Image (spheres, rainbow, N blue to C red):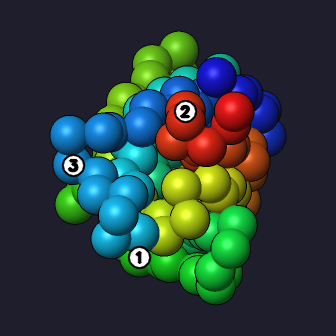
């Protein structure tokens, strides 16, 4: 589990390898990640966009961006949190992701950049 706090917003990430959905012989490794976004600021925020950097150890780097997270643009009140689970695939079985969210402060419409901590993804048998 990794955590990073930016502008009063705490982002925590937990990853898990999914062997039942993976096919190592076909260079297909599936990972899920659970993200918790905690609003520790004094302002209501709305998560409007996400930006990801995905680095597959033996292959290419990718960038992914889009509106919200898993089809939602959650509004998070002070002291509240939002959690979601998503996933990514790698060809090598080892990689990492990092990025940021853009959140809108509802009081004045100001857009803030909230960093997502870098996290590792590795099929357990690749680490031996």
**Of helix, strand and loop, which one carries label 2?**
helix
Where residue 17 is drawn, which disc sits there? none
Cα separation, mark 2 vs mark 3, equals 15 Å
> Residue 76: which quarter of the image?
top left
Left-right relation of 74 to 55: left
Where residue 124 is drawn, which disc sits there? 2
- Is 20 above or below relative to 22? above
- Is 46 above or below relative to 60? above
Residue 121 image position (x, y, % from top left): 59, 45
- Is 53 above or below relative to 77? below
**Of helix, strand and loop, which one carries label 1?**
strand
Mark 2 Cα shell of 10 Å, populated few (<14), some (14-19), many (≥20): few
Residue 118 image position (x, y, % from top left): 74, 48
- Is 67 above or below relative to 101? below
Residue 107 image position (x, y, % from top left): 55, 48
- From this viewpoint, is residue 50 visible? no
- From this viewpoint, is residue 64 visible? yes
- The residue that disc 3 covers is 21
Pick the residue in front: 83 or 119.
Answer: 119
> Residue 1: which quarter of the image?
top right
- The residue that disc 1 covers is 66
């Amino acid at each position: 589990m990794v955590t990073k706090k930016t502008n009063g917003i705490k982002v925590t990430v937990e990853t898990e390898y999914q062997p039942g959905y993976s096919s190592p012989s076909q260079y297909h490794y599936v990972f899920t990640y659970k993200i918790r976004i905690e609003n520790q600021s004094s302002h209501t925020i709305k998560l409007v966009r996400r930006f990801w950097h995905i680095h597959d150890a033996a292959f290419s780097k990718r960038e992914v961006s889009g509106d919200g997270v898993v089809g939602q643009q959650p509004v998070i009140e002070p002291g509240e949190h939002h959690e979601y689970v998503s996933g990514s695939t790698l060809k090598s079985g080892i990689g990492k992701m990092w990025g940021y969210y853009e959140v809108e402060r509802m009081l004045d419409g100001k857009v803030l950049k909230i960093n997502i901590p870098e996290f590792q993804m590795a099929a357990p048998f690749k680490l031996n």
